[in-house]
Image (cartoon, helix red, strand yellow):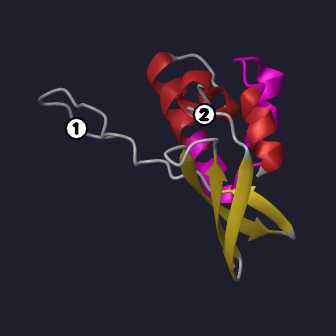
Amino acid sequence: MREFTERLASLDGSEQASRAVYELLSTASQTSLQARADRYSNASGRQRAPWAMLVPSRTHFQFSPQSFQARVIGKHALVDVLGVSPDQVAHVPCVLEKDLWRVDLPLPEPAPLPRRAGVSGP
């Protein structure tokens, strides 16, 4: 988690920084970002990499992490990222994959794509 927060802090929109954060994500999170990138690419006609879906303004903590507390149950963990004041807490789910802990970002399902009236098919 410490490495993840350090990489988030350096997330500046560059491909290198975004890819470094992406590498620490769980398979499920990477798959979700890939689906979002595919959806964007199909809608816009421009190729988008999955790590490009990590937007710096949406992925930073709203505070400076000071310490971490993990609760581990089997291959899952919930890491509390703590700031300097009691209200500065983020709960980050993680999962153990191939002997490495990965951040399991809780990404909501994308909204359904709007369809034109009278048009059928995918």
Mark 1 element type:
loop
- Residue 6: % across, % down: 80, 36
Badge 1: residue crowd in 10 Å (few <14, some 14–19, many ≥20): few
- N-terminal of the pair, mark 2 or mark 1, is 2
Q: In screen coordinates, is 114 left or right of 39?
A: left
| The quadrant where residue 21 appears | top right
Q: In screen coordinates, is 75 left or right of 109?
A: right
Mark 2 element type:
loop
Q: Given the current orientation, which residue lies at the most extreme front position?
A: 85
| The quadrant where residue 22 appears | top right
Quick check: is 40 in the magenta stretch? no
Q: Nearer the viewer, residue 90 or 113?
A: 90
Q: Nearer the viewer, residue 84 or 3?
A: 84
- 46 w.r.t. 82: above or below: above
Identified at 58% across, 51% down, the residue is 105
Identified at 60% across, 33% down, the residue is 63
Badge 2: residue crowd in 10 Å (few <14, some 14–19, many ≥20): some
Quick check: is 12 in the magenta stretch? yes
- 20 w.r.t. 25: above or below: above
Q: Nearer the viewer, residue 87 or 26?
A: 87
Q: Which residue is mark 1?
A: 120
Q: Given the current orientation, which residue lies at the most extreme right position?
A: 99
Q: Quadrant of the C terminus?
A: top left
Q: Amino acid at mark 1?
A: Ser
The boundaries of the magenta stretch are 10-33
- Residue 1: % across, % down: 76, 52
CB under 8 Å between callouts 2 and 1?
no
- 120 w.r.t. 107: above or below: above
Total marks in image = 2
- Residue 70: % across, % down: 70, 67
Picture disc at residue 63? 2
